[in-house]
Amino acid sequence: MSMFCFQCEQTAKGQGCTVCGVCGKKEDTAHLQDDVISSLIEIASVNKPNDETTKFIIDGLFTTITNANFDNDALKTMIKNPKYDMNNIWGANEDIRSLKSLILFGIKGMAAYAHHAWALGYKNEEVNNFFYEALSSLSKDLSADDLLKLVLKTGEVNLKCMEMLDKANTESYGNPEPTQVTKNIEKGPFIIVTGHDLHDLKMLLEQTKDKGVNIYTHGEMLPAHAYPELKKYPQLKGNFGTAWQNQQKEFDNVPAAILYTTNCLMPVKPSYKDRVFTTAVVHYPECFYIKEDENGNKDFSPVINKALELGGYSEDKKMPGINGGETLTVGFGHHTVLGVADKVIDAVKSGALKHIFLVGGCDGAKPGRNYYTEFVKQTPADALVLTCACGKYRFNDMDLGNIGGIPRLLDMGQCNDAYSAIKVAVELSKAFNCTVNELPLSIVLSWYEQKAVCILLTLLYLGIKNIKLGPSLPAFVSPNVLDILVKNFNIAPTTTPEQDLKEILG
């Protein structure tokens, strides 16, 4: 086979991409990404942790995440003496390959969160040191038992990483507040900002003051509207389009500049390539790259000038969501939800609230993801639905009503904001003097790429059981490893909304 990659949910035939990536990644790009990881394994094995090396490792891991970097020239700059043969992993015994893949893909996701925290000046020595430990372990002949311990440690350290990023975001931009966001686009010049990096968005908002250019979030950038220090900018108007996998259709000939701050980059069509700008670890051939200077600043004037040149729509434009809704409500992080915890507890005790569902995760283009839309539609009126990450676009424009003044659908933020859901679950378990597994709480996850992997590992580290995972199980989980997950955590694939709801609600 010319390449091998099975790190995302859409991988070919549910087994692995061996000719080219379903994501659009070519054979030579896949080999270069393997060389990047090989370099990082070598670097982690021979170097003691220091800021320069750690930053290189974090960015290198993030660079190889799905749908982030399609530019071979950019990848070549990150390859440093790749001695380790990645075929030692891809061609290993399937259980060893499975466990090492869980570790590798988990730290790729964790690196994304560490990258965002680092941009805001937040670091954690234990998190940083673990990147070295995990990478160097991939080249060692470890037993399955030792690797399984490292898999769960990846989840443990990722919890600390998500906690660090939560602190970085809230101390930098304030605690998210419930905020209604329009999906309608005003006439005139505008910029679409997609990805996850709030620091990049803040710099762009500063540089577009009084420029006559409006800013619209896209995909995982939606939760930015809830942060007080970001929502105060009047040019931050609303949210453009839906989830990342629809961008080729939604960006087609759009009269706006588009800034990619992180992954979730679909192969760029010629009809809008001239208006695409990338930054940080995101690269795409022939698209303008915004560099960072030695002080961490970026000049977004090329993006702003392109928006002014294109001029935007001549009239206001409506862009309803998948279910026809024109507004989205965001801002239900742990600070907000725990602020009304007494109402939640009272509602449970009175019987008004009988169940809580966490339905979230990554979205994707593969058929079958309408499961999540139908699942949420069919949840009973006496249940809350917590959500986070881009999978929520399947249902976040629906009005589910409320329970005792609390909206039934609570958007907790980006994928990394799964920390908020975990924190809420832990605090509720304390209030009811029970374990998280004894709460009337069910977790139904959609996964696509490696950030979903590290969140799943965190949930497993916490001992959370009965998770439903879909739309398909990871190709990199071998039958024996899956058997361990089923026996210890009762993890199971999603089936149909009707069948899963019947099982959950008994």
Image (cartoon, rainbow, N blue to C red):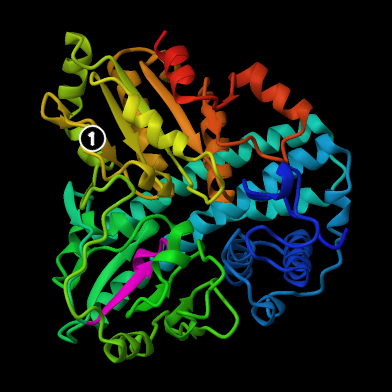
**Which residue is rendered at x = 39% and y = 36% of the image?**
373
Q: Position of residue 223 (x, y in %)?
A: 29, 54
Q: Position of residue 285 (x, y in %)?
A: 60, 81
**Which residue is rendered at x = 16% and y = 51% of the image?**
180
Q: Position of residue 446 (x, y in %)?
A: 50, 39
Q: Nearer the viewer, residue 287 or 356?
A: 287
- What residue would you read off at disc 1? 337
In the image, residue 487 above or below residue 286:
above
The quadrant of the rendering that contains the N terminus is: bottom right
Magenta residues, as a range?
A: 189-199
Do we see residue 204 in this rendering?
Answer: yes
Q: Nearer the viewer, residue 496 or 262?
A: 496
In the image, residue 374 above or below residue 335:
above
Q: Position of residue 63 (x, y in %)?
A: 61, 66
Label 1 CA crowd tier, 10 Å (few <14, some 14–19, many 20+): many
In the image, residue 298 above or below residue 54:
below
Q: Amino acid at mark 1?
A: Val
Q: Is residue 469 left or right of residue 41?
A: left
Residue at the far left: name it. Answer: 405
Place residue 359 in its image quadrant. top left
